[in-house]
Amino acid sequence: MNRHNTNAGDAADEAEPGTEGGAQALRIDRWLWCARLYKTRSLAAQAVSAGRVRVGDLRVKPSRLLKCGELLQLSLGGRELELNVLAIPSRRGPASEARGCYRETAASEARGLVWNSQQRLAALTTPRPEGRPDKKARRELMELARRQGRA
């Protein structure tokens, strides 16, 4: 048997010891990535390390094993989410599979609706130019930026 595993990202390597086949637990950074909450696993690990992901009100490390039934709280793009872990994925599959790994709590969904409406209102109040600036307006914008130290 080859002692060196060439497939370092195998889910069985990071599953709870003693579980072959269907994993009963998975590293939290890998679970967040497999559930498609973060685009890369390193972004998921950074979020966990920064304290934006909590399990049961406790700050955790990226290597913590996550099990079914646990409550996960995370800050994602300025929005606070509460998720119940329903499944441990064996791989990072399509989004339809990923959505089956968790369920958002009712309180979190209500907060999400309020957050979405606030974002919509903020977008409406943001001033929007009618079109592209002409040559003179562009020069004025560049001069303004220079005076403010941005260019």
Image (spheres, grey):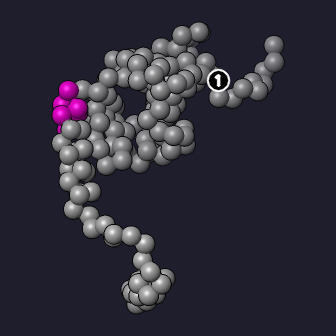
How many discs appear? 1
Residue at position x 55%, y 18% in the image:
90
- Residue 112 visible here: yes
Secondary structure of the residue carrying tag 1 is loop
Residue at position x 52%, y 14% in the image:
23
Image height of 18 relative to 112, above or below:
above
x, y percentage for residue 31?
48, 28
Residue at position x 33%, y 43% in the image:
75
Q: Is residue 107 in the magenta section?
A: yes
Image height of 21 relative to 128, above or below:
above
Asked whether 33 or 146 is in front, the reply is: 146
Q: Taken as a whole, is the magenta stretch helix, strand or loop?
A: helix
Chain part drawn in magenta? 106-111
Residue beneath disc 1:
10
- Residue 62 visible here: no
At label 1, the amino acid type is: Asp
x, y percentage for residue 25?
47, 19
